[in-house]
Image (cartoon, rainbow, N blue to C red):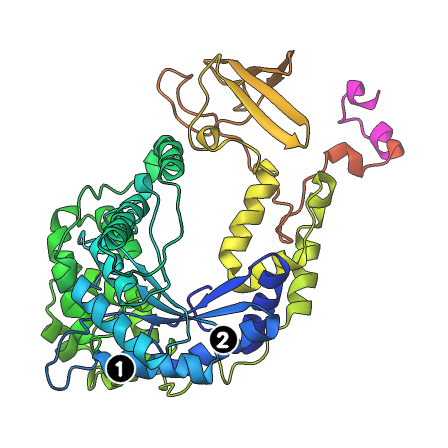
Amino acid sequence: VGYISYPDNVVYKFCVQAKKSGMDVFRVFDSLNYVDNLMLGMDAVHQAGGVVQGEVCYTGDVCNDEKGYKYNIDYYLKIADHLINQGETHVLGIKDMAGLLRPTAARKLVSALRAEFPSTPIHVHTHDTAGTGVASMIAAVEAGADVVHGAVDSMSGTTSQPSLGALVASIYQTQQQAGTSGGESAPVPDLDRQGLLGIHDYWNTMRTHYAPFEQGVTSGSTDVFDHEMPGGQYTNLMFQSQSMGLASQWPAVKKAYAEANQVMGDIVKVTPSSKVVGDLAQFMVTNKLSGSDVVEKAGDLDMPVSVVEFLQGQLGQPEGGFPEPLRSKVLAKAGLDAINERPGKNMAPFDFDSLGKEIREKWSFLAKDGIHIKEQDVLSAALYPQVFEDFMKFRAKYGDIENIPTNFFLSPAEPGEPIHVNIDHGKSLRIKLLQVSATLDEQGRREVWFDLNGVLRVARPKDNTDIPGKGGPAIRVNPQADKSNPGHVNSIPFFAALDRKTLISNPCIPAQYLN
């Protein structure tokens, strides 16, 4: 959930709450395929009454037959056996987040799993970074996979999933040929290709609204088989590299990622273990370090926090153990003891009652706006403390904005442009921006005129920006007390603190203030 280790009762409570909120299928994975972590998560889902989909994270190349290679077919069969016979998973998932599962490997892996576990449903998930996704998923289906994942055409390809439309069209043709030749093929649901095209058209338009979030990945790249970077991390790390001034060194970052992976022991790379490798790669490029430099100077380097936590054992135990002497050097410098068992095992139970009382008191002033702290909020605060804090501050400032159309949330409206907001069943608001004042008033506010359901309205929001041609630099306004901060005290008018007798008897106070 939060990609860190939590006390066990947090994991169990999350699964119960998620099930109550409508979650049916839980994909349970561990970023290192660490069985002890997997078993706890699967047990929590079982107890909550959910459908368990135990996932094997795929990495490396299952077709690599070199002696001593750890991610071979026996490795994947061993993890699957734990998930099925020990964790009692309802569905077995293969989670290929980097798109490393090429067609031959997909056929080999799925065939072996199907032969070993003939009655367990097998689902396969991949990314299309190298462009091999469609071929790999077809190979998986032919080898016995029950479900393969794709993305609607307009959202597919590159670091996303392979095209769902291409999968359907390809499998449909295979079925047609099998039927014509009298052969047999696995039954495939009768998917409506025209219906899929309609969905494609819709999301093709919607994608333009999210253009600010596009990271500039314009094509696939087969170098993923060298660096093994997960699809989701690829775009994130590209953006982070740009913000750190490493945009021109992106090829060097990818090369360093592959080297950092070997320094860490050639680990399974799924969030958060992939972040460990990514942070180390950026650290290496920024400081002009090679992998051997990192190992040699580990006792003197200020390693990224994620690297230190991984080597301590806060994510679990990697296949083949931790790299030495790197681990010992890093922990000695940090003054930390190694964790050699499930990290959540010895954590004290989380105190939900205390947290609930604390945040209900802190945000009680929002009740007047219809915002109340629910059990989901308490759990959110336990899982993501800072994210929840930022979310509540946002709500305190703007109220509930979930009904605002996405395009107007991301980009300002133009004068004369109508906005339709559905606030309840059968109730909607029609808002049209009319004009924004060119200058600020003495309080640093800008007048905004708009039409609300045919009625002229004006709002005067503070404008703390410096917009050329819009009145020059913003006016400095003294900050107000933050109601969510107990250390802030609202100032009160001076005279409100004095009784009338004191005011009348004080000759220094002008008479006009006494009326």
Q: Is residue 284 visible?
A: no
Q: Is residue 100 visible?
A: yes
Q: Residue furthest right?
A: 501
Q: Position of residue 428 (x, y in %)?
A: 64, 25
Mark drawn on residue 75: 1
- Residue at the spot x=79%, y=18% of the render? 512
The residues colored magenta run 502-515
Helix, strand or loop under label 1: helix
263 over 450 or under it: above or below: below
Task: Say which residue label 2 marks.
Answer: 42
Question: Which quadrant is the C terminus positioned in?
Answer: top right
335 over 5 or under it: above or below: below
- Residue at the spot x=71%, y=45% of the render? 365
Helix, strand or loop under label 2: helix
103 over 422 or under it: above or below: below
Q: Nearer the viewer, residue 340 or 94?
A: 94
Name which residue type carries label 1: Tyr
Asked if the stretch drawn in magenta spans residue 208, the answer is no
